Structures are given as C-alpha cells and as structure tokens.
Image (cartoon, rainbow, N blue to C red):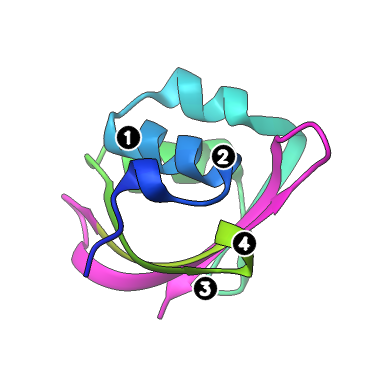
Amino acid sequence: MTIQTAKLSDPAVRAFVDAVNSHDREGLMALLAPGATMSDDGSDRDLAKWVDREIFSSHGHLEVDNESRGGRSLLARHRNDVWGEMRTRWSFTVDGDGRITRFETGQA
C-alpha cells in the first residue's frame, strides 16, 4: 500500500519526496544543509552528481510503501529511465533547522 506523499510524517522528508516526484532540482537542493552528504548501497557518492544522474536526468520517481523512525526511514519503489523500478530503502538525517544533512539509500 503506497503512502501518499502529503501523508509522510517528517516535513523535510515529505518535501524531498515531493521535489523528486515533481522534478524540482532547485527545490530539492534547497532542502539540503550546506555540506550535505549521501551514500548509495553503502558507498559515499558526490551528492549533486548522484541526484542529477539517478533522479533528474533519468526522470526518477518515488512511491513510498512504509515509513519508520518518525518518517526519517522509508521503504520505497524508486524508478527511473536507467534502472527501471527497484525496491529501495532511504534514511534521512535532519538538522534542527529542518534541513537534510545526510541521506542514505540502497536496494532493500
């Protein structure tokens, strides 16, 4: 059962998923704290290059199936034009200002 984006518990994570699904690169980058980092399948990646490749240039889309840790951990189906659809896990670290300082993703 998919969770509607508007029903996601954490405001920063909800805005992240919304930016991904509306292909709003500027909006997504504004959600990230200065110096934010990320990893994919356990390996740190260049965040700007990764979001361009895996989300924006490949028409990425997230459908969230489950959330935990107050909405900061997601199980979602991520699809894009490069990889098709896969079940993924997402974990977000959000600072006191509500900005994402790190996210980690990978196959679930």
What residue is disc 3 on? 41
What residue is disc 2 on? 11
SS type, badge 1: helix
Residue closest to the eye, 102 or 17: 17
What residue is disc 4 on? 70
Is 81 contained in the magenta span? yes
Quadrant in which the N terminus is drawn: bottom left
Q: Residue furthest right?
A: 96
Pointers 4 and 1 in contact (CB under 8 A)?
no
Tell us which disc is closer to us: 4 or 1: 4
Pointers 3 and 2 in contact (CB under 8 A)?
no
Which is nearer the N-term, disc 4 or disc 2?
2
The residue carrying pointer 4 sits among few (fewer than 14), some (14 to 19) or many (20 or more) residues within 10 Å by Cα, namely few
Q: CA distance from mark 4 to mark 3?
A: 22 Å
**Magenta-drawn segment:** 79-108
The residue carrying pointer 2 sits among few (fewer than 14), some (14 to 19) or many (20 or more) residues within 10 Å by Cα, namely some
Determine which of the numbered discs, if any, sits on residue 56 in the image: 1
Which is nearer the N-term, disc 4 or disc 1?
1
Q: Position of residue 82 (x, y in %)?
A: 20, 54
Q: Position of residue 13 (x, y in %)?
A: 53, 46
Q: Residue furthest bottom?
A: 108
